[in-house]
Amino acid sequence: MRAAADQRVAANTDLQDYFDAIVAADQKVEPRDWMPEAYRRTLIRQIAQHAHSEIIGMQPEGNWISRAPSLKRKAILLAKVQDEAGHGLYLYAAAETLGISRQELVEMLIEGRQKYSSIFNYPTLTWADVGAIGWLVDGAAIVNQVPLCRCSYGPYARAMIRICKEESFHQRQGFEILHTLAHGTEGQHAMAQDAIDRWWYPSLAMFGPPDGDSTHSEQSMAWKIKRFSNDDLRQRFVDMCVQQAGVLGLRIPDPGLRWDQERQAHDYTQPDYDELMQVIKGNGPCNRQRIDHRRRAHDEGAWVREAAAAHARKKVMTHV
Amino acid sequence: MSEPLWEVFVRPRRGLSHAHVGSLHAPDAELALRNARDVNTRRQEGVSIWVVPAGAITASSPDEKDAFFAPAADKVYRHPTFYEVPEGAEHI
């Protein structure tokens, strides 16, 4: 008995050592490899949250498909929202390789047991918001996601490579919408500025709490799931946006924004993290609406899934 | 909603093999193919798609460790670089 137990412990240490060696060598962990349970749980939480964000993220933009100002803009927005659905699907598939089922994932979202990015709990009030989402929200997402292409978990890294390629179209289309508005009539310029004013701080909050308050960061960095800290990524985003806002001819709504020669980076005002916590807790402007809509869409699609399953069964029977 | 899982393989262009690009759920093969078209080839990433029921795949070792492939490790003579070519031999 004793010998068997010792052997099991030794084998377990071997597994841990092998896992540690793979991560240390910047190799990828693949689905059927042994991995620490906490690594698996962390990845399920993060990938699921990411997938849910893509799916819920279809709503604020979908809100403007029927009211896009031209056929071209409508076709582009449709393609973009379809991409978000695709991104959600790549990510759900990646999460499923960790042993969780699609059904569980869908249920956890509509029952509020897993989160999605808080940014999608803000409303899209004007057409310029579609531009601001593309430029700022997708821009922040890209800054967050590019390092995830090197994440230690193979399926997640592969999904992120695809997603990042497609996101750059999203960011550019948003930038183009804002550029067009900013160089249009006075009213259009004001609409673009108003959108930036409302989306700037929620976009900064997308990078999560400051490093000192970030609960999952340290372990995720050690596992090479995460490569840079929240504050580093947020700084990178601010520095990029300042130059781009200049090209747009729009103002970043931060009186504290200035170039720090010594740090070679911009000083900026932090977003309101109390507001972020409130929105995460479910008290943002659209939290309830987003989940209600998702649940309704899921329920209303039930007959399609049932019909397709019945058709599949019937085909199997007639072909036997 | 327990639709079967399908593995998707795409031939990026003529002359290349199909390569695995991901997986998806669908009730049957025909819908799996249509879903794969929408999920994996929105930007002309392929000229041909295979969908395979995930359960139909037989895989090598239970993890991606190398014991199964170890016999190949000590057979360096399978590579042309193992051999010394005398000076002056051409086209070899």
Image (tube, rainbow, N blue to C red):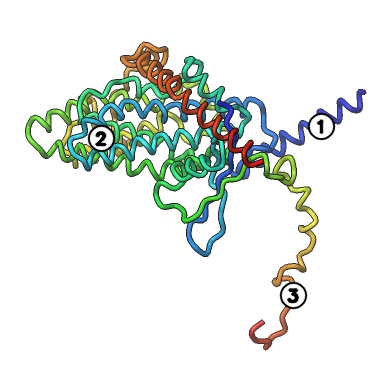
Instruction: Give the camera-side residue of A123 and A59.
Output: A59
Q: Secondary structure at mark 1?
A: helix
Q: Residue A244: where, in percent of width, then height?
A: 24, 40
In the rendering, which numbered label is found on residue B43? none
Q: Chain of mark 2?
A: A
Residue A227 falls left or right of residue A189: right
* Mark linked to residue A10: 1
**Along the horizontal axis of the image, is B34 left or right of B5?**
left
Marked residue nearer the N-terminal end (1 or 2): 1
| Residue under the point 55% across and 30% down | A309
State the CA–CA distance, disc 1 to disc 2.
55 Å
Give the percent coordinates (x, y) of residue A305.
Answer: 50, 28
According to the picture, the residue beneath numbered tag 2 turns out to be: A259
- The residue at the point 41 percent across, 24 percent down is A117
Mark 2, other Cα within 10 Å: few <14 / some 14–19 / many ≥20: some
Q: Nearer the viewer, mark 3 or mark 2?
A: 3
Give the percent coordinates (x, y) of residue A177.
Answer: 21, 38
Task: State whether residue A100 appears in this view.
Answer: yes
> For numbered disc 3, what is the local secondary structure?
loop
Of A277 and A85, the residue lying toward us:
A85
Q: Which residue is denoted by mark 3 in the rendering?
A: B83
Task: Residue type at mark 2: give it.
Answer: Trp
Query: Type of residue at label 1?
Result: Ala
Residue A185: image quadrant is top left
